[in-house]
Image (cartoon, rainbow, N blue to C red):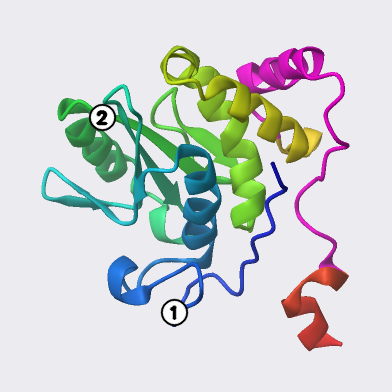
Amino acid sequence: MGRFNGRSIGRYQAHCSPTFCIAESGGGTSAVERDLFTLLRQVFSRGEQPYKVCGQSADMGFHLESGLTIVIEYDGAYWHADREDRDWRKSQMIMAAGHQVVRLREEPLELPHDLDLLVPKRADGPRCAALALPHLAHTFYGELADVGLEQKFGHLTLVNKPRPDDITCCDCRDYVEYVEHCFPHSPSPRYWPLPRDLTRRARRRR
């Protein structure tokens, strides 16, 4: 399995690209959400962006063969500041429909639920995906094992290993250590983000 090679250009996507259709995803979809969905869909295979549930539009939803749907929301610090109550009510509505909700919340936002995960400020899609992989793996380990995805998650966690300083979840840290013992011969990890001189934004600034 290959490494994640997505790129984020700016914070919001205003045009179509080979991996993104603005007509389907809407003009308010950020580049982080687009890249995060593209990368996680490589793992889950079945996903929707946006995902419509309970009359609400969630950022993305992924469907397991077991019947479980995992809804993932990306909450940027600028747009979601002081909106914890509203975000939590939305999560409760989605969970009441039988889905699981994981919010990736940009620092310094608070975490309204113990399933949610804090991601670094200004982190791009690949960096968020690298953090989301171990978090989803240990949170839904039983469900992933039932559909044969736990090994895929473990391998990709090591290949796209999150930067140690980015990990704020103790269970994520334990999971990374666990899979290091399970996959001793995995390729050397690639840490996110990519060097700035390799990004398109950095090249424009030269």
**Residue that label 2 marks:** 99
- Report the amino acid beneath label 1: Cys
Q: Position of residue 27 (x, y in %)?
A: 34, 75
Q: Is residue 202 magenta?
A: no
Residue drawn 73% across the image and 78% down it: 201
Name the foreground residue: 85 vs 106.
106
Residue 76 appears anywhere in the view: no
- 58 above or below 142? below
Magenta residues, as a range? 167-196
- 91 above or below 36? above
| Dot 2 crowding, Cα within 10 Å, few <14, some 14–19, many 20+ | some
Q: Position of residue 36 (x, y in %)?
A: 52, 52
Residue drawn 76% across the image and 54% down it: 193
Which residue occupies the extreme left position in the image?
Answer: 55
Which numbered marker is on residue 111? Answer: none
Q: Position of residue 203 (x, y in %)?
A: 81, 82
**Residue that label 1 marks:** 16
Residue 32 is left or right of residue 115, and the answer is right
